[in-house]
Image: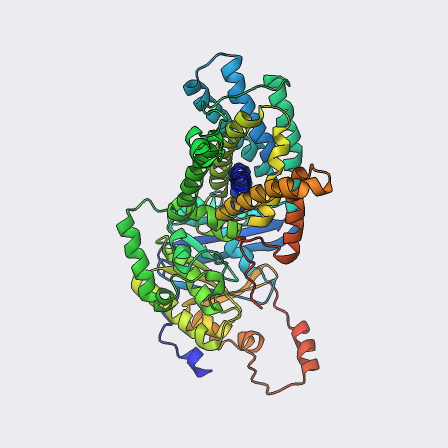
Amino acid sequence: MSFFFEVLVAGLLSGVMYALVALGFVLIFKASGVFNFAQGAMVFFAAATYAGLQQEHHLAAWIALPLALAAMVVLGLAIERVVLRPLVNQPQITLFMATIGLAFFIEGMSQMFWGSTPRGLSVGVEDQPFQWLSDRYNVNVSQFDVFAAVISGILVVLLALFFQRTRIGRALRAVADDHQAALSVGIPLQYIWAIVWAVAGFVALVAGLLWGARNGVGFSLTFTALKALPVLILGGFESIPGAIVGGLIIGASEKIAEVYLGPHVGGGIEGWFAYVIALAFLLVRPEGLFGERHIDRV
Amino acid sequence: MSRALSSPNVAPAQAAARPALAVNNVEVIYDHVILVLKGVSLEVAEGGIVALLGANGAGKTTTLKAISNLLGAERGEVTKGSIEFRGERVDRLTPNDLVRRGVCQVMEGRHCFAHLTVEENLLTGAFTRRDSRADIAGSLEKVYHYFPRLKQRRASQAGYTSGGEQQMTAIGRALMARPSMILLDEPSMGLAPQIVDEIFGIVGDLNGRERVSFLLAEQNTMVALRYAQYGYILENGRVVMDGAASELADNEDVKEFYLGLSTAGRRSFRDVKHYRRRKRWLA
């Protein structure tokens, strides 16, 4: 039983990390209706920048962190200004294609700046089990996982408050609902989109640091980030709580499937099991658990 | 019908003073090729209600969007002419700048933010204001005073409210910006006559008590002329006729084309079509 518990907790905690990446997608999708394929590349770029600043330029964490944040905000603003603004009013698929191109550009750019060799990254918390939990209950729970979950939780609460309670947050949701109407009441779209991309850059930095610390900063980060896809399908593309719950379900179920189902089918199902769940979910509830239902007048 | 002609709201003709809004000979082209407005000129007096009438595709909505600078989002462009609000050229401003100067459009088809509550919809209208929370709460109360129904529905998602309530939400949202002029596009669209009367009544109230000017695009000619003081009739992107609302309502051609009334008695539908084709207005 304690083994099952261990697997479940490890799954839930890694699910929180998926949720963190999914959040970046949700933010941009919510405010501009664009599925930003480049979010994974942004996560990679953020982690590479932070690790590069620390290791190549030997900067302390408290200097490297704000610098990396600034780089992400500038990157977000630049994407909005150079790529998305000229493409406004184009069909969704055009914007999606643009973000695919962007993904490869950002990956190339970060390798140009910081090289292509994977680096380690430390955020000061080790991936070790809590000793007292192991001693008393014989359950191993990683300190790093708990740390990551707490950070993610704080971020989610902040974002939810920002969206629900502030004037800018309300404007963001308004823009998501109806661009034209938002313009007509004087909400400047560019300003709103710039904010969203900057915030998405910030979320990518947090996700990049946590994932980088766990798996190392390498090209594979962009693929890890794509795990956010099943999370989004499960939770709904427009919902911040959906990203969290979706992340938890995906994280827990893939770990449990790997441990209990894997041996029967030869193992190695952790990598794709999430997509099976997502597919099954699409059939039953295409808008996701918390996605916004389309409101149509008939 | 006689209601339309003996309205208490019909004021003397357009005030002679400098108009609040002046549109001079504006030409609009969509997508660089489609000429939609071919030189439209009109004026709205400070505190007036002006009706912009015409059939589908005459250019009413385009005229309003040209004024509010919302054309850019639809690949339209003002290529000739000028638009002045209180003596200042406004045709190169952003919608945001224009709302700050007091001109706000309520778009055709309501365009509420479907997933926001009615109250959140209203609050987005105050986006451009830098006022304190108390001031904005005051404006909110005022909107609820004019639209008591919205107060009951304040916590509902706007997408689930009725068409009339959505129209009220859209007008209330514009009011939250504290505009001095509202460009109101087809408020009667798809609404029951009773609701249309209710909404126009409130428009008249807002005009009388809050001194908000309205430029009103409508297909419902009868109702529009009852509340407006002055009217312009658009056809094919041109103003083909203008005059005091009472004069327009009395005009035989207007009666026939837009009110479906005729002195010549009933005619067969085929004749009407033929007659209309022959008697198109010339610009």
Q: Is residue A40 or residue A104 the one in the foreground?
A: A40
Asked whether residue A45 appears in the rendered view, the answer is: yes
Residue A107 image point, x, y percent: 63, 26
Outermost residue to the right: A266
Number of numbered discs: 0
Q: Is residue A294 or residue A152 the one in the foreground?
A: A152
Q: Is residue B42 or residue A165 the one in the foreground?
A: A165
Query: Which quadrant, please, contains the C terminus of chain A?
Result: bottom right
Outermost residue to the left: B134
Asked whether residue A20 appears in the rendered view, the answer is: no
Residue lying at 56% horizontally and 22% vertically, measured from the top left: A48
Q: Look at the picture and state if B109 lies above or below A209.
A: below
Outermost residue to the bottom: B265
Residue A290 image point, x, y percent: 52, 53
Q: Is residue A267 or residue B16 the one in the foreground?
A: A267
Residue B67 image point, x, y percent: 48, 52
Residue A295 image point, x, y percent: 54, 61
Q: Look at the picture and state if B233 lies above or below A76.
A: below
Q: Is residue B26 left or right of residue B169?
A: right
Residue lying at 44% horizontally and 37% vertically, measured from the top left: A155
Q: Is residue B205 left or right of residue B237?
A: left
Q: Quadrant of residue B50?
A: bottom left
Colour scheme of the picture = rainbow
